[in-house]
Image: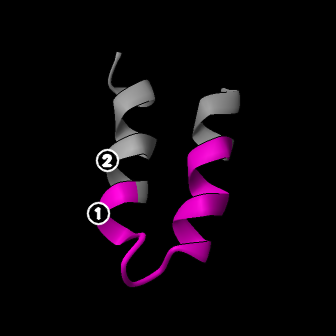
Amino acid sequence: ELGEEFPVKLHYGFAEGLGNATYMLAPRIQSE
């Protein structure tokens, strides 16, 4: 439920600062 929107929101929110970190976290959460 939230797992799909969680990585997306994090990627868009942190993309400005971390970008790389969110990029690695997003696909990892989606995989599960």
Total marks placed: 2
Picture quadrant of residue 28: top right
**Where is residue 19 drawn, in percent x and y?**
52, 74
* SS at mark 2 in the image: helix
Up the image or down, 28 lies above or below 18; here it is above
User: Disc 2 designates what residue?
Assistant: 9
User: Disc 1 designates what residue?
Assistant: 13
**Where is residue 21 drawn, in percent x and y?**
57, 72
* Left or right, 32 with reference to 15: right
Residue 9 drawn in magenta: no
Bounds of the magenta span?
A: 12-27
Q: Cβ–Cβ below 8 Å for labels 1 and 2?
A: yes
Along the viewing direction, whichever of 19 and 25 lies nearer the viewer: 19
* Left or right, 20 with reference to 5: right
Picture quadrant of residue 20: bottom right
Along the viewing direction, whichever of 18 and 2 lies nearer the viewer: 18
Residue occupying image coordinates x 61% and y 61%: 23
Tell me the CA gap for discs 1 and 2.
6 Å
Residue at the extreme bottom of the image, as rendered = 17
Residue at the extreme top of the image, as rendered = 1
The C terminus appears in which quarter of the rendering?
A: top right
Q: Amino acid at mark 1?
A: Gly
Up the image or down, 24 lies above or below 6; here it is below
**Where is residue 1 drawn, in percent x and y?**
35, 15
* SS at mark 1 in the image: helix
Up the image or down, 15 lies above or below 3; here it is below
